[in-house]
Image: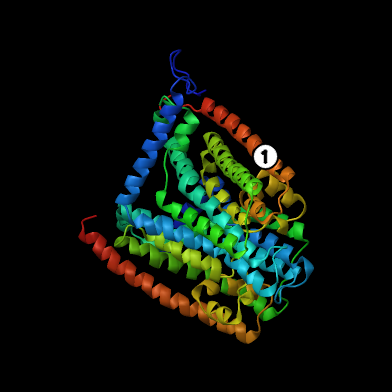
Amino acid sequence: VTESKAGALWRFGVAEAAAYRASLLIWILATTLPLISLVLWRALAEDGSIGDYSQRDFDSYFVTAFLIRQLSSSWVVWDLDRQIRTGELSSLLLRPVSPLLHHAMTNLAALPLRMVLTAPVALAVLFAVGGISTSSDPLALTLVPVALALAWLLNFVTQLAVGCLAFWITRATSLYDVWLGAYFVLAGYMLPTSLFPAGLAAVARVLPFHAALGFPVELVIGRLSTAQILTGLGLQLGWIAVLGSLALFAWQRGVRAYGAFGA
Amino acid sequence: MSGLDVGGGRPDGFEHGALARHLRLLGAQLRMSVLAALEYRVEFWTNGVVNLAWSFGGVVPLFVAFDHREDVAGWGAWEIVLLTGFFLIVSGSFATFVQPAVTESMGRIREGTLDYLLLRPVDSLMSCLVAAFSPWSVLEVFTGIGLAVLASVQLGLSPGAEQIAMLVAVLVSGLVSLYAIAVLILAASFRALELENSIFLMETLLDFAHWPISVFRGPLKLVFTFVIPFAVMTSYPAQSLIGGLSRGEVLGALATAATLAVIARLAWLRGVRGYTSASS
């Protein structure tokens, strides 16, 4: 029975994404910061490598970062914040399916269309820079889908945890903006974290930001040894466990508090 | 000039006393925004501090680049600080004045309440551009001014009259261009409301302005000088003080800003003419 419910939610999500396709496209274009970074770093690397990144390495890094960001994104924090503030959540709670599953499915269901809209942008950039190089290690390539799925889940539970704060405070999305600001700098979104000064790089690379973006990107372009790959996956799982339990805890407490003021 | 031509006696915004009326409207809107901002002090953190932190975050790559290079496309570290100061001034002005007004006006187009703005006895575009402000974001502008002054002192700059004049000319050109692009987005959203999010696209593109224009070559350099003139907004002001800006470039900046402003004004008039409020 749950399967058919999930299926129905999936179809709903696909239809919703299709209805808002123009907005979706503009959102995709608005999250092209990695492509902006690509232009800048490639210009800087014109007269020689920067750190261990040549021009082509920057191309590979940022095109991949753009794609991974698109594939691992969700927007549950904004939806949840609005639904809690306006009371919309009440009608979701009455449905015979958890609102969490509802959000997970509708967010996932937008991915196929997102890919269709992203593909031309990515192809145009690929054509402009003349191709990229990816990993040739079979183990790394097999693990790419796993790392990607974990990155999506990590982003989702993070947004869920922050979104649930809307049960108690009115500006949960602003708190997420703070998180996002740190993500831009530390996730390897504006530059590969390995270019940071050594100490900062070491710290940045164990944080959840890097697990959500930098790690899968480096996995795809083949910059990681087997040991590093396994550590990366472990960090992803660890952060999902931490942030996921926080999210579930906040959700359960929040729904109780929400019911208490008669919504 | 207004899209809603309701009657012969309607003030067109250019007759005697019109300027005072426009200024009164601006004053009233500013006062209201400031009062609201003082009421909701949490916005000091959400609009002021967070925005500032984001803008500083955007500078991190530049300073990482200095970790690996002596200079960035010919710019030294303090020169980049100067550039960052001007970037904060521009991006802070965008967050304080441009973005809130455009977002508010778009919301009104969507809900059909733009009519109330259009019916005011002032210019319709002016009415929209003062529709909302976000006063706390001005923190970013002040930080930018502070950084620019600090960097000028560190670089030992002593700009003469001509350089100050150039600075003012390119700063004004930059801000006019910024407004013009925002108005173009606003005018486009009369046609297709999905374009509402383009203002965020603009915010993303603004990240290019973090970097000196000399980083770019070929077509991108032309685009950022003449089409979306980020160069005029941040690199030129810094160059005018350092002393690397020619008169021709200043004239080019002025011409670009004027052209963009005219195009934006025409697009706006066209957009308003096509606007059939929620009730009709």
Where is residue B122 shown, x and y percent of the image?
A: 44, 26
Where is residue A6 shown, x and y percent of the image?
A: 44, 61
Residue at image location 29% in from the left, 62% down from the top: A168
Q: Nearer the viewer, residue B74 or B55?
A: B74
Residue A126 seen in the current view: yes
> As drawn, which residue projects farthest toward the top?
B8
Which residue corresponds to mark 1?
B256
Residue at image location 23% in from the left, 60% down from the top: A259
Residue A4 seen in the current view: no
Q: How many other residues sit within 10 Å of disc 1, few (<14), some (14-19) or many (≥20)?
A: many
Q: Nearer the viewer, residue A2 or A29?
A: A29
Q: Is residue A170 above or below residue A150?
A: above
In the image, A124: left or right of B195? right
Q: Nearer the viewer, residue A27 or B237?
A: B237
- Dividing the picture into quadrants, the one containing residue B150 is bottom right
Residue at image location 49% in from the left, 78% down from the top: A237
Q: How is the image coloured?
A: rainbow
- Dividing the picture into quadrants, the one containing residue B148 is bottom right
Q: Is residue A34 above or below residue B177?
A: below
Q: Amino acid at mark 1?
A: Thr
Count of marks, rendered view = 1
Residue at image location 66% in from the left, 70% down from the top: B65
- Dividing the picture into quadrants, the one containing residue A171 is bottom left
Q: Quadrant of the C terminus of chain B?
A: top left
Q: Give SS at disc 1.
A: helix
Name the chain letter of the residue that bears numbered label 1. B
Where is residue B23 shown, x and y percent of the image?
A: 43, 32
Where is residue B252 shown, x and y percent of the image?
A: 71, 41
